[in-house]
Image: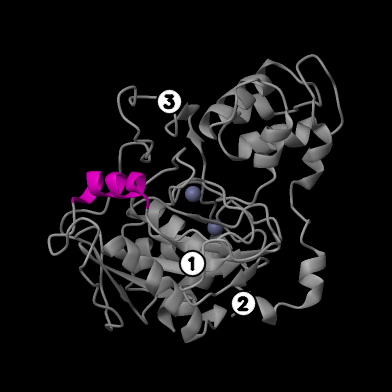
């Protein structure tokens, strides 16, 4: 059983060899060309759909339907053979999207909705099986908007010390790894959880890697901007980031707004968000929350909001050594092995030839 689990863990990492991502330590180190590309966005062609409404047929609407399907707003059955017609399915998707993102619910492709759609974002779904947890149920008397995965999966009580490891092929520097360390600490400060870096990929609870395009889990990345990263629910422990982004590895002391351009993504901001998924949180409709699905390029958001803290403490309780805002410091850099390796990764697509590759890796 453990052997099969290990195969499952590793398969997605060898479908496509992870490549080195582009990291910039500060704004001045970014080549001028990157600034020229500031307006590029994987979904910028949607902008021409402004003003479109039900009953119309316009080139590009089928791609927009694919976008909504990508994030759970349109079912797989409804998107099969989809057309460029603005139909009831698309209008319903837009309604729900507008509600989730605190936009005026018009059912039309107004400019504010399109501005939100083209923003880079997390690749995880906003809706699962047609159900939105972001901004719909409970909540009449409260402001909470945090959500969980279906079934509210979380790391078991016996797992309060979690380990994480980096895919070795990325050859990440210590400077990059410290960004992840800071991000994990933000969550450990408000929970009983501790995170320790492991040099052993096989023994780690959480495995982190940068990948480009299709990388074996059925959720390909899309080049610069668009989707930035995605992460699994507990206890799978996989965090994937798009190596085609231009990642800024700031020192953690810069202001929230870091750039007037949108071509560079703050790594720590994205990692803090994805760790929320790894621990069991879904997306939130609170725009200041870490678990809000989108972040503008050039923006920096790393501080947990009240909504994030309430959500994570619902799953794990507060930090027994802190004040809820968190004083506990996680132990780090400890060499570890072993660990709970039951992995569950929504949407993974594995192929047999890759299993052979993983067996080779395990043995040698
Ligand atoms: Zn997310
Ligand atoms: Zn992935």
Mark 1 burial class by Cα count in 10 Å: few <14, some 14-19, many 20+: many
Where on the picture, by quarter, is residue 45?
A: top right
Name the residue that disc number 1 marks.
268
Name the residue that disc number 3 marks.
136
- Residue 274 x, y percent position in the rendering: 45, 57
Direction from residue 86 to residue 328 in the image, left or right: left
Mark 3 vs 1, N-terminal side: 3
Q: Which of the colour schemes (rainbow, by chain, secondary structure, one colour) is used?
A: one colour
Where on the picture, by quarter, is residue 8?
A: bottom left
Name the residue that disc number 2 marks.
23
Query: Quick check: 341 above or below 143?
Result: below
Mark 1 vs 2, N-terminal side: 2
Direction from residue 262 to residue 5 in the image, left or right: left
Of all residues, the one furthest to the front in this rendering is 255
**Was residue 336 drawn as part of the magenta stretch in this picture?**
no
Give the residue displayed 71% in from the left and 62% down from the top. 261
Specify start and end residues of the magenta stretch as a single range.
305-317
Q: CA distance from mark 3 to mark 1?
A: 29 Å
Viewer-closest of 275 and 285: 285
């Amino acid at each position: 059983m453990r052997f099969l689990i290990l195969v499952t863990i590793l398969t997605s990492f060898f479908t496509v060899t992870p490549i080195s991502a582009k990291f910039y330590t500060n704004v001045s180190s970014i080549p001028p060309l990157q600034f020229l590309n500031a307006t590029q966005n994987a979904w910028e062609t949607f902008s021409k759909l402004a003003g479109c409404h039900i009953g119309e047929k316009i080139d590009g609407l089928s791609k927009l339907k694919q976008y909504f399907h990508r994030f759970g707003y349109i079912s797989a059955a409804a998107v099969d053979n989809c057309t460029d017609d603005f139909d009831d399915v698309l209008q319903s998707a837009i309604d729900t999207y507008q509600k989730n993102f605190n936009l005026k619910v018009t059912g039309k492709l107004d400019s504010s909705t399109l501005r939100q759609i083209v923003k880079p974002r997390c690749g995880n779904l906003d809706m699962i099986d047609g159900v939105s947890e972001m901004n719909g149920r409970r909540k009449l008397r409260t402001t909470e908007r945090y959500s969980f995965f279906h079934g509210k999966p979380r790391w078991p009580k016996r797992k309060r010390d979690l380990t994480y490891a980096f895919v070795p092929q990325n050859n990440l520097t210590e400077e990059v790894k410290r960004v992840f360390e800071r991000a994990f600490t933000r969550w450990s400060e408000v929970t009983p959880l501790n995170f320790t870096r492991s040099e052993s990929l096989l023994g780690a609870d959480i495995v982190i890697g940068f990948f480009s395009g299709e990388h074996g889990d059925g959720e390909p990345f899309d080049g610069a901007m668009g989707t930035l990263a995605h992460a699994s629910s507990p206890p799978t422990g996989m965090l994937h980031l798009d190596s085609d982004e231009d990642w800024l590895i700031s020192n953690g002391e810069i202001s929230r707004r870091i750039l007037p351009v949108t071509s560079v993504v703050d790594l720590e901001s994205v990692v803090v968000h994805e760790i929320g998924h790894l621990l069991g949180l879904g997306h939130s409709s609170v725009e200041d929350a870490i678990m809000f699905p989108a972040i503008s390029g050039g923006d920096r958001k790393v501080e947990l909001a009240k909504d994030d803290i309430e959500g994570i403490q619902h799953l794990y309780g507060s930090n027994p050594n802190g004040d809820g805002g968190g004083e506990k410091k996680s132990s780090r850099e400890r060499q570890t092995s072993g660990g709970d390796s039951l992995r569950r990764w929504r949407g993974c697509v594995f192929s047999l030839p890759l299993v052979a590759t993983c067996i080779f890796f395990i043995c040698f």
